[in-house]
Image: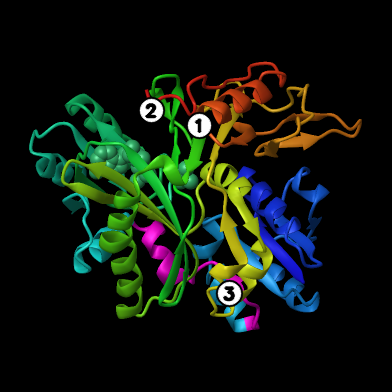
Amino acid sequence: MRILVVGKGGREHALVRALAESPGPCELFCFPGSDAIFELAKPVPVTGLESLIDWMQAHAIDLCVAGEESYLVKGEGLANLCAKAGIPCWGPPKESAQLEASKEFAKGFLLRNGIPTARATACATYDEALAAIAGDYPTVLKFDGLAAGKGVAVCPDEAAAIAFLDEVFIQRRFGAGRVLVEQCLTGPEVSVFAAIVDDQHLIFTPARDYKRIGDGDTGPNTGGMGAVASRQLIPQQMLTRIETEIVRPTVAGLRREGLPYRGFLYFGIMLTAEGPQVIEYNCRFGDPECQAVMPLVRGDMAGFCLAGAKGGLRGDLLTFDEGWSVCIILASAGYPESSRNGDEIAGLEATPGTRIYHAGTRKTAAGHWETQGGRVLAVVAGAPTRAEAVARAHAAADPIHFAGLQRRRDIGILHFS
Ligand code: AMP
Ligand code: GLY
């Protein structure tokens, strides 16, 4: 089987590893990929989406796996172009990927389908947004478009709200677009991933990510500084409730609204006192949750994705480990405001039972790894208990060094004490 994975980060490195470890013979390709991914998947010598499709057709690619969201909504959409070219794609078409690309679309979908979520008002101007907040703090402001994880502000007071509205409507930091003013929910968060194939779904191991840069969940939001995954993360009863009240109605809503879906769907959920509520959808696996979840998945991931892309949900091809998996992100100097490239990385040899995924690295001509981006590495370890997985993951991260390294010490610990 010839599979091409689209993306270049730690999530894609984990996906490529999982595909490479599938039992059948498999030739892997990656676009745009990274030096670390190229050790498992061949680079594709094209630049744009259109030429990628031509290349896949010319090279008899059996399956395209969408890792990263941006290609799903770029131009005509990766999955739409694959469909036209007759290439099975694991990842939804552009119209369905609006669930992630537009917060306003997602909110409408949730409300139309009776899925629990926070109340919200869409606002086109600075003044409309201030009026919708109506002095009710804390409030949550969301830019209505893809903003690389930077488009949401939880505002404790008016000063924070004004600062965000200024970025959106005056500086136009994210380009043109509206803002959702949303009721602020409280409670622990959980990331639930389902593989969706038309009217069927399979829920993967739930995870939790650590969004802020500093220990104790302090400092600015990041793309994610770590994750923990386990079936035991939430009680079975709660998972059943999430499946009944959120996952099933989402799958039914997609069908009802004529939105085709074959791929991973990520449900960002807050466990409020009133029950689980959706805070966001993403049309892909989470990053860094993917790096925590994939080592718990056994079986034939390649066969699973190929069957899914062709319309068959083959849950029988996968099993999920019962234990815990902890993923620690090592970030470069300056992250998340900026990042620093070119710091040499030492101590990269993974110990047995641990995995190191590369998120932002490059290999120099001399064969050394160096930083190339904000999130640099994900160090993952698994164990039957959370305490052991935490100890192993942190011990595995300890020997890795580069100048300016930033890392949280409470990944897998906070939220559980
Ligand atoms: P999102 O990009 O939608 O995942 O939002 C980023 C983070 O903002 C979430 O992980 C939550 O921590 C927080 N957030 C989003 N929506 C809400 C909400 N309605 N109430 C409280 N916190 C929220
Ligand atoms: N970990 C959050 C995300 O992938 O959006």
Neighbourhood count class around disc 2 (C-alpha, 10 Å): few under 14, some 14–19, many 20 upward:
few
Q: Earlier in the sequence, mark 2 or mark 1?
A: 1
Q: Position of residue 2 (x, y in %)?
A: 77, 70
Confirm whether residue 8 shows in the render. Answer: no
The answer to which image quadrant residue 60 occupies is bottom right
Q: Is residue 402 magenta?
A: no
- Viewer-proximal residue among 201 and 289: 201
Name the residue carrying label 1. Answer: 386
Neighbourhood count class around disc 3 (C-alpha, 10 Å): few under 14, some 14–19, many 20 upward:
many
Q: Nearer the viewer, mark 3 or mark 2?
A: 2
Q: Is mark 1 within 8 Å of ligand 2?
A: no
Name the residue carrying label 2. Answer: 416
Q: Amino acid at mark 1?
A: Arg
Name the residue carrying label 3. Answer: 309
**x 66%, y 60%: residue:** 299
Q: Quadrant of the C terminus?
A: top left
**x 28%, y 68%: residue:** 249
Q: Is mark 3 within 8 Å of ligand 2?
A: no
Q: Are marks 2 and 1 in contact (CB under 8 Å)?
A: yes
Q: Amino acid at mark 2?
A: Phe
- What element does badge 1 sit on? helix
In the depicted structure, whether residue 387 falls above or below residue 358:
above
- Viewer-proximal residue among 261 and 221: 261
In the depicted structure, whether residue 343 falls above or below residue 375:
above
Q: Is mark 2 within 8 Å of ligand 1?
A: no
Alpha-carbon span between mark 2 and mark 1? 10 Å
Alpha-carbon span between mark 3 and mark 2? 37 Å
- The span picked out in magenta is 85-102
